[in-house]
Amino acid sequence: FCDGQKAFYMEPPASLVVPGEDGTLTVWGTMQVPNWAHDVVTSCTSLPKHKVVVNITHVGGGFGGKLTKPMHVVCAAAVAAAKTKRAVRMHLNRNVDTVLCGGRHPMSIKYEAGFDQKGKISAIRTHAYVDAGLGDACSTFTLGIALQNMEQIYGIPNLDLNGYLLNTDKPGNTAVRGPGEPQATFIMETIVEHIAADLGISAQEVREANIFTSPEGMQKVAANPTSPDVDQYSAMLEIEQKLKEGKGYKGFPALGIWTTLKQKVKFDEKAAAIDKFNSEHRLRKRGLAMTPVKYKVNTRGQQALVCLYTDGTCLITCDGTEIGQGLHTKVVQYAAYYLSQIVPGGEAVSLESIRVGPNGTDKVAHGSITGGSTTSEGVCEAVRIAIGKLQENLRPTKEKLEADGKTVTLTGLLAAAAGNTELQATGKCEENFAYYCYGACVSEVEVDVLTGESVILSSSMLYDCGKSLNPTIDLGQCEGAFIMGVGFFLRERLVQDNSTGQLATDGTWEYKIPCSLDVPLQFDVEFFPRPFSEGGIASSKASGEPPLVLSSSVFCAVKQAIRAARQEFGLGGGNFRLDAPCTPRDIALATGASQETMKLLR
């Protein structure tokens, strides 16, 4: 069983609605998707859409929790403003929001697996029972994602995956950062650990038996990890070729990532050192685990409006919402580069001369959503297309100035073109492009077997980011996603009344998100240097959600540490059940430590 997780953004849902002349409403709110808010406000007020303008500026975090769940707040404020003809502001406090807004879907899973003596998996059958609450528009696709991506990068020839959405008398659960993905890796890695325990071999052996076609293939990958030629040694791709199923991976750097990271952290030496530590320490145990991720994303038809002014400045409006993912920073950088190409060889356009304003339905009538990790790159592409149109608009004026022998600057060009040239243009990302992100992470943990407290000693992540649009932002996204995953696997327990379903963990005092002491003592994030030449926006890849899945390495490392403790206390090294999140209480109970096993050593 893996429990749910709250989005737990910094800013709870809020809205300000101001009535205007001619029966209009101007709406401000903390939503991820302005056109969805536009739909519900016009529906509940019976106003036509041209009388309602929805604006969204910077939002204090979203994580998927502000896709559909804040709509009741904006609707309530809109109805009150329309009725009273006065401005209305509404916000939910943390406790009310935590109860009302659902979260990640809890799942109960039953599984069967067939495998040989080397841990090679021949078949898996699962039944996943998903608590959808009262239901949400995002529940069906969340379950679909969990089932479609469960195998990660493992080659499994026979998969029979079944899922069931169960409605319960609780608030509807919804998409939360990486919907369905952490549940999928929880299922898969639990099966891997179970197989390893039954065979008496390491989980690392089972993983590699199902990632690579053979040990010899793994050695060939390690010899040249960034070459596309080594993709042929993937057990997954080998199976798909036999079945003639082409999923369009557009490159498969997962193997090179795995072998490179394993060598970089000296995995075998770490494992030996941990075995030595565990043999010498009775009340503290360590664990080590390495897990992969394969994560599919899609770009969408993001839209942008670019306005140029005669002082050389630029205002951009887009359908993407800045929720802390660095959207505006990437867009400004991207726009600065392409605006500088309007007058090649001239002075570079400064970042300070470009601003991304609030998105609004009076500028982008019906845009796309913010979510799925690809909004930034989609908006960047839309901005590039819009700037390309502006460049064509300005070309006749530029050529006339050059023919007259005048020095052309962007500011001078805009001033000369004003009055007879459109200085605004729209763009839309027409490339609805699907691709996969890959990565691997090695985590080492230490567990106090009496209290169940755990410390992440180190986590080393190697991630496939293509040619990053902004490496600093993408690195921060990797770190933040990983820590949110640590919360899912180790900390964020939902406590509910068994009879009424009432949530007891409804605030910051009761609901424990990861804090500073949950960050790995040594935290390394590196981007894999294999180019993403097969496509994408400027050869970049998404970073907002896939690294969250890699926090499964921490969960599996904790399980290894618990297994060492159970062996110490006479429970053996066989398989045992460990649900997520495994809080300190769960860990302490699982270790098998008791008064009977405690002895004073002289």
Image (cartoon, rainbow, N blue to C red):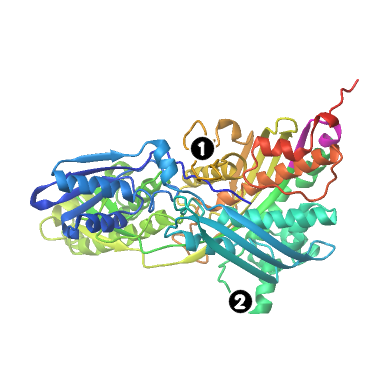
Residue 94 falls within the magenta-colored stretch: no
Q: Is residue 445 left or right of residue 388?
A: right
Q: Is residue 574 left or right of residue 332?
A: right
Residue range of the region highlighted in magenta in the rendering:
277-287
Residue at the image position 70 percent from the left and 47 percent from the top: 578
Which of these two is toward me, 542 or 123? Answer: 123
Q: Specify few, some or many for label 2: CA neighbours under 10 Å numbering under 14, 14-19, or 20 or more.
A: few
Q: Please tell me whether mark 2 sits on a helix, a strand or a loop.
A: loop
Q: Is residue 265 left or right of residue 412?
A: right
Q: Residue furthest right?
A: 602
Q: Which mark is residue 245?
A: 2
- Residue 313, above or below 523: below
- Residue 553, above or below 588: below
Q: Residue 304 location, x and y as percent?
A: 29, 57
The earlier-in-sequence mark between 1 and 2 is 2
Q: Quadrant of the C terminus?
A: top right
Question: Hey, what amino acid is under mark 2?
Answer: Glu
Q: Residue furthest left?
A: 22
Question: Hey, what amino acid is under mark 1?
Answer: Thr
Q: Specify few, some or many for label 1: CA neighbours under 10 Å numbering under 14, 14-19, or 20 or more.
A: some
Q: Which residue is mark 1?
A: 505
Residue 279 falls within the magenta-colored stretch: yes
Residue at the image position 25 percent from the left and 58 percent from the top: 364
Residue at the image position 50 percent from the left and 45 percent from the top: 500
